[in-house]
Image (cartoon, grey):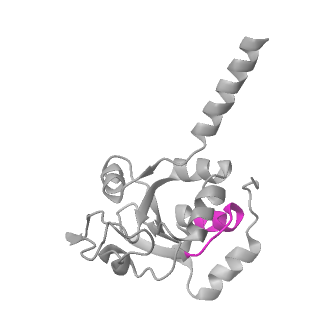
Amino acid sequence: MKIKFLVLLLLSSLGTYAQQIQWMSLSEALEAQKKEPKKIIMDVYTKWCGPCKLLDKKTFANPDLARYVSEHFYAVKFNAEGNEPIRFYDQNYVNPNYDERKKGRNATHQFTQFLGVRGYPTMVFFSEDGDPIMPVVGYYTAQQLEPYLKMIKQGDYMVFQDPGDFEKYLKTYVPRFRGK
């Protein structure tokens, strides 16, 4: 009886692990795209941002969302106020005013500015070629983020002619991700 319980416990923990998003750096994702083209979802966050922490704890932890992202995207975490050097479009981006002694807010990274990020969290999507597609700003539940993920993955965003097209898309979209 004890062995059965331990085996079930081990299998359930493996299932949980398999449903977690495996985050990487942007350079790792761009390198991976050379071998297997996939779009990128970049979570642009800060350490002090409450909604960013909720996004991690609730949305990205949703098993359906985690499975979908892991299968169809390279998932990148990027600290908008960190000091990670970024090379993108043959340009180097740094955070020259980064202060490692600060516990709260820090200086904004140059790459954050390049992307035009003005609020946190922001999820930035990139094409298989590494070109920015669009940002999604704010906290979203898994069910709210699902239509964006599927629209980007399927390339539906390329056929929208005006902003109203996306609103129509959302009204007819039926979410499939279960709540956590």
Q: Residue 83: x percent and y percent? A: 30, 66
Q: What kind of secondary structure does the magenta stretch mostly adopt?
A: helix
Above or below, comparing residue 143 to residue 2 in the picture: below
Instruction: Using the image, determine if residue 22 lies above or below residue 4.
Output: below
Picture quarter with the N terminus:
top right
Q: Is residue 142 magenta?
A: yes
- Relative to 55, residue 7 above or below: above
Q: Quadrant of residue 103?
A: bottom left
In the rendered image, the vertical position of residue 169 relative to residue 15, given as above or below = below
Q: Name, please, the residue furthest toward the right.
A: 1
- Identified at 69% across, 68% down, the residue is 144
- What are the residue bounds of the magenta stretch? 137-151
Relative horizontal placement of residue 175, taking residue 69 as reference (left or right): right
Total numbered labels placed on residues in the image? 0
Query: Residue 20: x, y in percent?
Result: 57, 45
Residue drawn at x 33%, y 52% as measured from the top left: 28
Nearer the observer, 73 or 120? 120
Q: Is residue 34 left or right of residue 175?
A: left
Tell me which corner region of the image, top left, top right, bottom left or bottom right, holds residue 179.
bottom right
Q: Is residue 57 magenta?
A: no
- Describe residue 32's horizontal placement relative to residue 14 as left or right: left
Q: Residue 112 placed where, x, y %?
A: 37, 75
Q: Residue 89's x, y, as percent?
A: 25, 70
